[in-house]
Image (cartoon, helix red, strand yellow):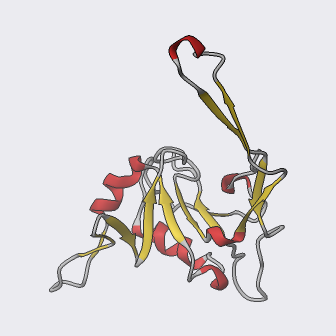
Amino acid sequence: MPLGVLSDPALVTVSKETGQPASTFLYENVTKMLARLHPSAFRGAIWAANQTVLPQLMEMSLSVGTGGAPIKAVEERNGRFYLLGKELAFTEKLPTLGSKGDVLLADFSKYVIGMRQEVVLDKSNAPGWTEDMQDFRVILRADGMGSWSQAVTPKNGDSVSWCVVLQART
């Protein structure tokens, strides 16, 4: 069974803002998460979020002084979403808004998958032989985990990693 990113020993959890309301995701959270991403992971990193975070993301903006218009943090181009220029994918596999891990910033090239044996494809006509039907099944024995044993703590600064989440806001 793959370990998963949210259980990875190198996962960095960023603290929420002081006084941050429950079930919110703020621009400050985004910038602090990006700051905790290891420099080697910048190029390949993407954002992943539960779709319940979408309303918070669509309303997120950065005000530009007194004379400027707000700048949207999330863009949509050709059916794809981007947050601070990095692709943003939505998945039901992450926890809902307000939970730890509802938004993830990760470079999945640092996640390794190992296959324990070759893929096996079985075919049988036994369950539906009177109806001229066949059943198929695929057996795949694999495991997965991050390639780092822990987050990296530089000489100066906070620990950084290939995978970053925000703490729970409940």
Q: Position of residue 24 (x, y in %)?
A: 41, 53
Residue 28 picture location, percent across and down: 45, 70
Question: Between 102 and 142, which is closer to the camera in this rendering?
Answer: 142
107 shown above or below 118: below
Q: Position of residue 58 (x, y in %)?
A: 29, 60
Q: Quadrant of the N terminus?
A: top right
Query: Residue 106 falls in which quadrant of the image?
Result: bottom right
Left or right of residue 31, residue 2 in this image:
right
Q: Is residue 48 above or below residue 76?
A: above
**Toward the viewer: 38 or 134?**
134
Q: Residue furthest left?
A: 67
Q: Residue 157, located in which quarter of the rendered image?
A: bottom right
Q: Is residue 24 left or right of residue 65?
A: right
Count of picture labels: 0
Q: Is residue 161 left or right of residue 71?
A: right
Residue drawn 59% across the image and 61% down it: 165
Q: Residue, x 33% and y 72% (percent of image)? A: 73
Q: Which residue lies at the image location 63% right of the left edge and 22% below the top edge?
A: 125
- Write down the quadrant of residue 164 in the picture: bottom right
Please tell me which residue is depicted at 18% across the width and 84% down the height of the picture: 68
Q: Position of residue 22 (x, y in %)?
A: 45, 47
